[in-house]
Image (tube, rainbow, N blue to C red):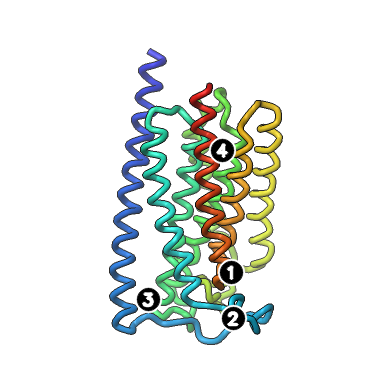
Amino acid sequence: MGLLFQKMKIQTRNNIITFLMFISMALLISLGLIYGIELFQGRISTYPGNPYHFLQDYALFRLNFYAVVSSIFILAVYVFAFLLYINISFEKTRSTEIVYFSLFLIGCLMEPVRLLFSMLNLWDSCSFIAVAATRTIIFGRMLTPASLLFSVLYSNFESRQYEEQNILILVAFALGSALIAPLNSSFILPTGKVQTGLEGTFFCMRFLIFVISIIALTVKCRTSNMSASIPIGFSLLAIGYLLLTDSINFVQFGIGAPALWLGTYFYLKGLHSQYLWD
């Protein structure tokens, strides 16, 4: 009976991941077509001016609109690609980490909302659409680090019975953060969002959650005979994600994209090998 229930839970998880995979594919194709047509017809607006000063005299570090757009699209491709990878590689694997990592991917899927700023020319005023888009982005950016933290803290066998409860906690935390986050309506960032009040504090909080997750996973790796590729991959994907979500130039994009993709591959490959041995 217990084995049957476990198989049913795995099948339900697989169905949800398959559904998310098709949603991400539809979103990617739709965005590519619509944005491509709008760009071809000259209806895409770019950010007026450059609010940055640090290293802006160097071409590779200068604010570049196409680097911002490229980082958004690479995240959309990333979500689809790794949902497909999970669907194939973890089809019969009862991995709690994959549940939380899927939430991480859902958080990444909120990033394409930033394209609305250039498609609808939302740079000049803090409209309702700009605010709604920003709160959607904040939801995703709070869900991602928290999901990875839970994947480390609640990955043991005893915690599996709390998966649904933890998912609700994570969604409620991200949603609450998005709704109560103060916004500086007088300033819109070139990355495609209204500036969050205490922007530096907000970034540091996300960064700190990632650091805590990396430390906890490293300690867990050393005490439970886990593959070293798991914490290494985890660290790379966290760094890549942070760089891509705030990418304003091709240096950040050039470092962030391979770090995210390679880190995720090493992390998931290590997890898969770990569960095969177990």
Dot 2 or dot 3: first in sequence order is 2
Q: Residue at x 54, y 42 (%)?
A: 266
Secondary structure under the numbered disc 3 in the rendered image: helix
Q: Secondary structure at mark 4?
A: helix
Instruction: Find disc 3 in the rendering and name its residue.
Output: 119
Between circles 1 and 3, the one closer to the viewer is 1
- Closer to viewer: mark 2 or mark 4: 2
Q: Residues within 10 Å of mark 4 (few under 14, many from 20)?
A: many
- Distance from the alpha carbon under mark 2 to that under mark 3: 25 Å
Q: Is residue 48 above or below residue 132?
A: below
**Distance between the alpha carbons at the discs numbered 3 and 4:** 36 Å
Q: Determine which residue is flagged by label 2.
A: 59
**From mark 2 to mark 4, how far is it between C-alphas?**
39 Å
Circle nearer the N terminus (2, 4) = 2
Vertical order, 37 against 177 (above or below)? below
User: Within 10 Å of the Cα at label 2, are there few (<14), some (14-19), or many (20+) other Cα atoms?
Assistant: few
Give the quadrant of residue 198. Answer: bottom right
Residue in front for this viewpoint, 15 or 194: 15
Give me the C-alpha separation between circle 1 and circle 3: 24 Å
In the picture, the disc for residue 151 is 4
The kind of residue tagged 4 is Ser
The residue at which mark 1 appears reads as 251
The front one of 152 and 167 is 152
Name the kind of residue labelled 1 in the image. Answer: Val
